[in-house]
Amino acid sequence: MSDRFVEVTAPSNIAIIKYWGKRCVDLNLPLNSSLSATLCQDHLKSTTKISTSPRLTDDELLLNGCKQSIPQNSRIQKCLSQIRSAARMQGIRQGNSSLDDIKVASQKMKISSTNNFPTAAGLASSASGYAALVFGMGKLLSVKGDLTPIARQGSGSACRSLHGGFVKWQMGKEEDGSDSTGYQIAPETHWEELRIFVIVVNDMRKKVGSTAGMQLTVETSTLLKHRVEHVVEGRMKTACDAIKNKDFPTLADVIMRESNQLHAVCLDTNPPLRYLNDVSFMIMDMVHSYNTAVGSLQAAYTFDAGPNACLFTTKSRANEIAWLIRNLFPTDSSDSDFFRGMSVTMSAPKTSVMQMIDLNAYSSNMIKYVICTKVGDGPRLVSCNDTRLLSCNDTRGDAAD
Ligand code: PMV
């Protein structure tokens, strides 16, 4: 039995309908369904290399080059043990032909994962990281079928990063979480005019992680109860329809309201959780001021558990948004260092629009850099040392509706 090796990449995602609150911490089951756009991994990705060999004596994990303790990380342990048992079960079902896979499933693994964007700063690095881990292990052990319930146990939002395009994480009803899965509602090719600016305000690690934050919210916020019971379902339908119909103003409205409600719920937590900072509010003001000046919603902001913004807009408006960011948030960086990712040309809005926007610039270097990107595809197998792994079925499951 030879050693096996895979290298995979997985994308980050940004939530349009936010997940905040668990109904079961142990199985990582959410209080509500959520919806996200997968970000193009040409610009934001986790790269994970996994090797397995009979000579390894322990599972090993390196994150951005630093050794992590697996025994102290119950989520990683869950992902490892569940993928191994899925491989064994599948092997047993298939009989002798997969004896090798069963043996490989009991070998230790060496995992090395890197992100090409700030880790734990509200840019869903745990989503891309766990998606890459689970997708990579699935490939390594030739596991077929839907891996989103396993990825979900690493980080809830990771189940959405196992698909490209627009992805719904259905909360499910079953107590064992078997129907709490992620599936694609529209592929990345569906709405190619969409553009996303990831505005990196602060790449420090966040103070309160999302799991601890969510639990505190569940225990103390009355607004969360209202949101889950009366708000999310309607917004989910509006957002899915807006995506289907490529109706940007409607989608923009839901995106901003969802972001604002997430942070309102955080503030309704006791003691309050504060993920946004002054620069986040400046970015919100810029977007509202632009939308008012152009007379319709042509840009939308959204923030996860951190101060960095994701701005949604369309190709036809992207150059004006880039111009606004650059002019309202002066920086010592060159244009090429400031705007990363997809190439973007800045163009000033027309005079009538400019006259309606407060163009007083904020102080310098409030924004570190901006990653220009779009909606992208799901995880990719970059390389492996066994051609049989290349042909193993897709592990991302089918769309549920
Ligand atoms: O997947 P987690 O546990 O990192 O939580 C993600 C929470 C938010 O990013 C704030 C919202 C979301 O739906 O991604």
Image (tube, helix red, strand yellow):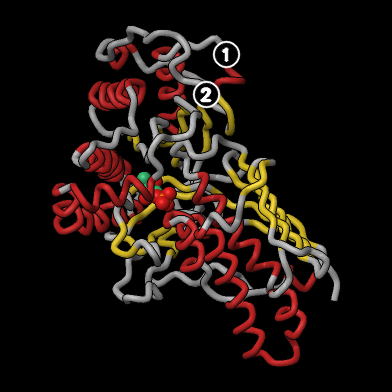
Mark 2 sits on what residue? 369
Q: Would residue 256 appear left or right of 210 to someone viewing this image?
A: left
| Amino acid at dot 2 | Tyr
Estimate the x, y position of residue 233 in percent, counting from the top left. 22, 59
Q: Would residue 66 appear left or right of 183 to someone viewing this image?
A: right
Q: Crowding near pointer 1: few (<14 within 10 Å), some, many (20+)? A: few
User: In the rendered image of this protein, does residue 97 appear above or below residue 40?
Assistant: below
Residues tagged 2 and 1 counted as in contact (Cβ below 8 A): yes
Mark 1 sits on what residue? 333
| Amino acid at dot 1 | Ser
Estimate the x, y position of residue 5 in percent, counting from the top left. 77, 62
User: Residue 186 or 55: which is nearer the viewer?
Assistant: 55
Where is the C terminus found, in terms of image quarters? bottom left
State whether residue 253 appears in this view.
Answer: no
Q: Would residue 209 appear left or right of 23 to someone viewing this image?
A: right
User: Residue 198 or 1: which is nearer the viewer?
Assistant: 1
x 47%, y 36%: residue? 121
User: In the rendered image of this protein, does residue 360 appear above or below residue 75?
Assistant: above
x 25%, y 47%: residue? 217
